[in-house]
Image (cartoon, coloured by chain):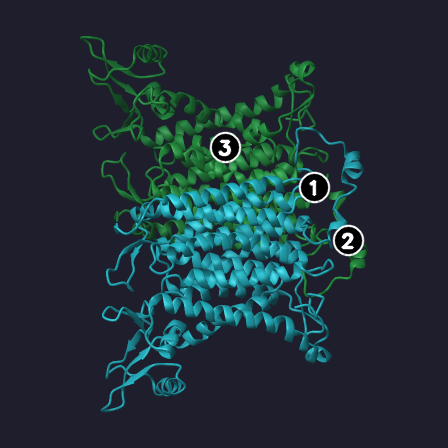
Chain colours: A cyan, B green
Amino acid sequence: MAASTRTSLSRSEALGLLTLSGASLAVLANTFHDDGEPLIASLALSLLAFALCYAMIRWLGPRFIAAGFSGRDMSKASRPLLPECMGAVCAAVYLLTVIIFIPFPFYKDIVAATSGGGNRDVVLQAESVNQGRFLHRFPHNKMLQPNHYSAPGQLASYLSAIISLQTIALLGIGDDLFDIRWRHKWWIPGLASIPLLVVYFVDFDVTSVVIPIQLQPYLGELFDLGGFYYLYMACVAMFCPQSINMLAGINGIEVSQCLVIALLLAFNDCLYLLTPYPHPATDSHLFSLYLLLPWIGVSAALLRHNWFPARVFVGDTYCYFSGMVFAVVGILGHFSKTLGLLLIPQIFNFLYSVPQVFGLVPCPRHRLPRFNARTGLLEPSTTPWSPDRQPAPLVGRLLKLLASLRLLDVTLDPEDQSFTESSNFTILNLWLVWRGPLRENRLAWEVTMLQLVVGLFGLFVRHKLALLVFKEDNWGTPTLT
Amino acid sequence: MAASTRTSLSRSEALGLLTLSGASLAVLANTFHDDGEPLIASLALSLLAFALCYAMIRWLGPRFIAAGFSGRDMSKASRPLLPECMGAVCAAVYLLTVIIFIPFPFYKDIVAATSGGGNRDVVLQAESVNQGRFLHRFPHNKMLQPNHYSAPGQLASYLSAIISLQTIALLGIGDDLFDIRWRHKWWIPGLASIPLLVVYFVDFDVTSVVIPIQLQPYLGELFDLGGFYYLYMACVAMFCPQSINMLAGINGIEVSQCLVIALLLAFNDCLYLLTPYPHPATDSHLFSLYLLLPWIGVSAALLRHNWFPARVFVGDTYCYFSGMVFAVVGILGHFSKTLGLLLIPQIFNFLYSVPQVFGLVPCPRHRLPRFNARTGLLEPSTTPWSPDRQPAPLVGRLLKLLASLRLLDVTLDPEDQSFTESSNFTILNLWLVWRGPLRENRLAWEVTMLQLVVGLFGLFVRHKLALLVFKEDNWGTPTLT
């Protein structure tokens, strides 16, 4: 075990976490009554989740190494052995949090609505069923009222989100244990999206999309995608986890990108809560906040341990799970297009990777930037080309084109102009091609800032420019920023 | 890897499974329409689950061994290395099955009832919300109609059951990976019961129990247990998995006992479906069947591979998961007392184990019966007593009392009457004390039959004698057998 790995909390850490937990518990205790504010409860629980996750990651490190979950940090001179898969701790704490949170938004609103699988021992009088007990079945008045989340269908959605997230956690752990082949990995999040899609099918089954104004004369205002809508949702659920998993390889980058995306999504959600009047989309965005805030909490705790110099690794489980959190809120909140705008770096990274993913260019097992032990800086990692193994003519021209656009580092043999090596197709390597060798934390920081800037621009596009192609922002107040 | 482990299906097996799957799919395709019968769909899906699980256990054996999930069968002369933890495959197939099943009982009954988190892109007209779309919010008429399962609260219950089962699967795998200490293991199913209890709290929060007639003058007809009812449910959820995990150690016994319990529970459920008129408890028992049938399917597949001579081991995950299935149906179906009657062998085994569990008698790590390689038979395993480590006086008297009641094998030193060894406190060892050395499959068969006979007697007590202490059977027709 690496000597540098601390396995207990320092006194100031312990004190800080205890204070935070105590304050959160106090807030929580005050929140749970009839007119309690679920959003405050969610915030308090998220802080609790941060504290618990922070401590557990520290404590469980040695157990993870003992159980075989460990890996060496290749981008350090000493190549320390670090606990791997700590994202599983985040996932566990997160799941516990969102489960415990259930009563805060959903309690009592639904009691009168159920036919009572409850208390079968007492034989119900059939008359009472259709009379007294079931009169105020739903709190209709709450339906368009913000900050309350009430209909039973939304409880079912919330539960289906938990099931999908648990499934991705199970499959992510399975992946880490059984070393599933890359091709098969693609299907893992698809499998995990089934619960979500099934409950969506049972609960809503709304499969129409709004058509841009310019196309409305031809296609009408709404277009029913039918089964394709489910395919679309499954694709969103498959893309998010994989694309986050692809933007990985240096300390902190997996967590920091997720944290930025989650914060931007939460910011976008908050915009809908601040509308001066109740808005139909408010519930969706509250739903989204309830699922995002605890994830921000546990991710922040993980980032503290995973940021350069990392003392733990996050594992595939974290990337899968995080992507699934985004997919779930995007799908159930019906803002998957907005989500797409926040994932532009990931989408670019995926498209940029295509030549290696589809085998046009050889793809080594790891494409993380190369650590130069002499300078202590990261440089773009490369794929070597031997004289007897050159790219196909068309691929060769593509590589040269990319090199001339500064989208690739290509080294040619000065004698016969054959390829010697080309940089790997990831956004991290590309950034190093542009900016030159960087320290690991500097690279992580710059790419995180890139994510933030692109995401903020995406939200600006979403709320300012979307009105050019759609008749109305579902926000309802196009003038509010 | 053991040479005896086949890793592919034989031709007749493949043909049989394909035929079974084809037939099930055909039935399924016919079942999914508006008036489809969910119970038939559940049966068909359970057969599919059997086929899938059967094949996957065969295929995945080597992968499990490669991933480190393996163990030696100590009760065979050759001590073959077998894949361990195959219960995880059952759990995965089961979870997939119950998730895919969701639309069959729940589709369309709930669509009109939701306030539509659906289609946020289309701004709903507030008027339409309270008028057309939501008029027939619930299919009230179905509420007391058998074979339909409709209220949204029941979908939430079903989903919470899935979450609890997924949690126990996650924790079971965690247990197998991290080798959690025995004392901490007790809390695992308690943790997994949280989702169930939380949704129960949100959905029903009915915490009254019916008081036996004899006590009604003092306590009233109903007694509200309040928070203690949740404690009771958590205890049921903790006891079931642990008690099944304790009755283990020989080929097939874990699965065969679970299969018997599941079949008896399903039999009990069927009694409620056969009542000549709709009964309030029918829905609970349909709910129970929907969760039990797939479990019977995957357990039967596992038993074929785990029965003597075993080619796979089931792992703690199977026992935990199975116990949780029973706890979930017992709690949500409100027949936890009936469940208790079916678990009498497990309860006896637990009580019988108390001297070793609480350390009055030393408890070796494994208490499974001892294999006598010379005879090929199993004999009671024993705890040795050395002359300098004798039981406390009171414990010694207890051991002698049990021995005189033929509830223990005790060997005394002929010279000074000190203890040399005593048999371990498990029902399997006790059975061997009574019946003498047995072949492994014979022992498993006899204990399984014991489970069946005791369970049938339990059901008889439940339906015939319960009327002596309760005013009415919730069955409604005390004369029907």
Q: Nearer the viewer, residue B117 or A19?
A: A19
Is residue A425 at all visible to an observer of this figure? no
Q: Which mark is residue B134?
A: 2
- Identify the residue at horizontal 33%, vertical 10% (top origin): B394
Q: CA distance from mark 1 to mark 2?
A: 16 Å
Task: In the rendered view, tell whether residue A168 sits above or below residue A234.
Answer: above
Three-letter amino acid code at the position of disc 2: Phe
| Residue reaching furthest to the top | B416
- Identify the residue at horizontal 52%, vertical 51% (top origin): A294
Q: Chain of mark 1?
A: A
Confirm or deny contact between disc 2 and disc 3 (CB under 8 A): no
Question: Relative to residue B75, is residue B446 drawn left or right?
Answer: right
Q: Secondary structure at mark 2?
A: helix
Q: Which mark is residue B261?
A: 3
Q: CA distance from mark 3 to mark 1?
A: 30 Å
| Rendered location of residue A443, percent (x, y) | 38, 69
| Rendered location of residue A135, percent (x, y) | 79, 41
Mark found first going from the N terminus, 2 or 3: 2
| Rendered location of residue B57, percent (x, y) | 39, 49
| Rendered location of residue A277, percent (x, y) | 74, 59
Q: Which mark is residue A56?
A: none
Task: In the rendered view, tell whether residue A254 sits above or below residue B449.
Answer: below
Q: Which mark is residue A114?
A: 1
Q: Quadrant of residue A303?
A: bottom left
Three-letter amino acid code at the position of disc 1: Thr
